[in-house]
Amino acid sequence: MKTTRYTIRFTLALFAVLAAAWFAQARFRQPNAEYQARRAKLRGQVDGPVVLFGYTSRNEAGEVAVFYQEENFYYLTGYSEPDAALLLVPDGPGAQGPSEVLYLPPRDPRRAKWEGPKLGPDDPSAPEKTGVQAVKPFPELRGDLVNLAKTYPNFYTLLPKGPENGYPHLATWSGWVREVLPASEIHDATPVLTAMRMVKTPGELALLQKAIDLSMDAHFAAMKMMRPGLYEYQVAARMKEVHEMGGCSREAYSPIVGAGFYSTVLHYDALDNEIKDGDIVVLDVACEYGGYAADITRTLPASGKFTARQKEIYEVVLGAQNAALSAAKPGVYMRELQQIATEYIDTHGKDLHGNSLGQYFIHGMGHGLGLDVHDPTNYNLPLQAGMVLTDEPGIYIPEENLGVRIEDDFLVTEKGNILLTARLPRRVDEIEKIMAEGRAHPQPQAE
């Protein structure tokens, strides 16, 4: 009975949040209480202080560079300015001073004339604005860590596990921590943060749904405008316009619009080819709202009608997607969903040589979704309620210039799942109907 009451409360709260997301206008941070709860939860799971660092001012040169915060730092603070650090101290008998401190760089009044006023460590309203118990100048972090080392043998930060794509943020700051605390044990906070980020709060679900809604709107626009003679970049530009007009801060990833042969290239992003009559077009395009990313793919016939062969392959992919989705529930592993999708594809349809199609499904069937389009997820653990993932089987046959991918986002619930992208059609007849309506009432297109 307890489980039943919890399920009902969770479901009602979820639908209230998702309904509210339709009317949400603010694209920015969640209330301070959301981040305070996360910090308190993290402090309760470690046996020593945690120190995390936001990104520095920018990781590339150039006037077009835009700052975006390190995801774990943003997850715990909602603070989106550069050059900050966060210190969390666990509760306990030996705890002294504030349990959480945000360290900010000094503010230069001259730069404010160019960039606008920024919150500084000497601002008396800083704790109230950030929701963090104490706010100090960044240079004080070193001394605070040294003092804490007199009480705590263990410290936690984010440790690198490999190359960092040319931006050595974790290596730089974890090295700094080791230098400041040479006699302390430095542990990786990543596993604890990953476990926390895997299960989304109602506030996170609202932002995810907003990103998904705007991404679906963009796919509707693409369905209605698609026709031979357009260039791939023109379709992507229309979709990005829908995102930005709706309040998305940026694309969740580089838009993929691949026609003909390029429908078989998984991460094709050149977008410089003309879409031709008879082409199949893969559109993997989605936006980010309030820091949270959607991830949606649809496959469209350039002419508005699938050929018999295109429809055949499309129906196999759709069947595999539905088979995996119907099995997604708490206790099931992602590898099991992968196997279900692969077996479906392998037992339905053939290539031109009579071989099964399983060899053309060359990627994973899904991944976690959240602050990152591939959100940290421990795939060695089973699915649990509150996780948001993608379901994205595909078949790519270069010999036929034929690639099909269908990707949707779903929320795991206590008894199954909810398809968060259900408003965007997946069936062949539904897609062709929308495309026909777009041709009947065409919108002016830039040439």
Image (cartoon, rainbow, N blue to C red):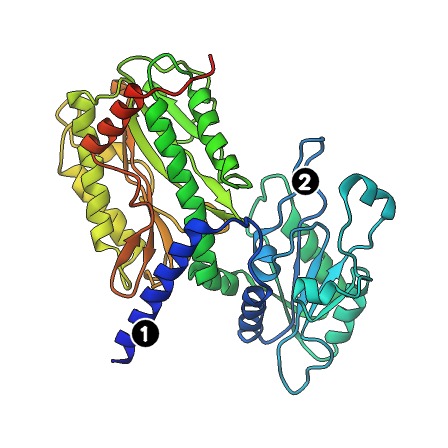
In this view, the residue in front, 386 or 185, is 386
The reply to whether residue 345 is visible in this rendering is yes
| In the depicted structure, whether residue 61 falls above or below residue 132 | above
Q: Is residue 357 at least partly visible in the picture?
A: no
Residue 88, given in percent of the width and then of the height, sits at: 65, 70
Could you tell whether 31 is left or right of 205 in the image? right
Q: Residue at x 59, y 55 (%)?
A: 74
Point out which mark residue 205 bears.
Answer: none
Question: Marks 1/2: CA distance?
Answer: 45 Å
In the image shown, does 96 or 36 lie closer to the viewer? 36
Q: Is residue 58 above or below residue 50?
A: above
Task: Report which residue position mark 1 lands on.
Answer: 6
Q: Amino acid at mark 1?
A: Tyr
Q: Mark 1 or mark 2: which comes first in sequence?
A: 1
Q: Nearer the viewer, residue 396 or 63?
A: 63
Q: Residue at x 73, y 57 (%)?
A: 176
Task: Name the residue rendered at 29%, 13% in the picture.
Answer: 277
For image coordinates 38% across by 55% down, the residue present is 19
Q: x, y (%) of residue 239?
A: 44, 30
- Name the residue that disc number 2 marks: 59
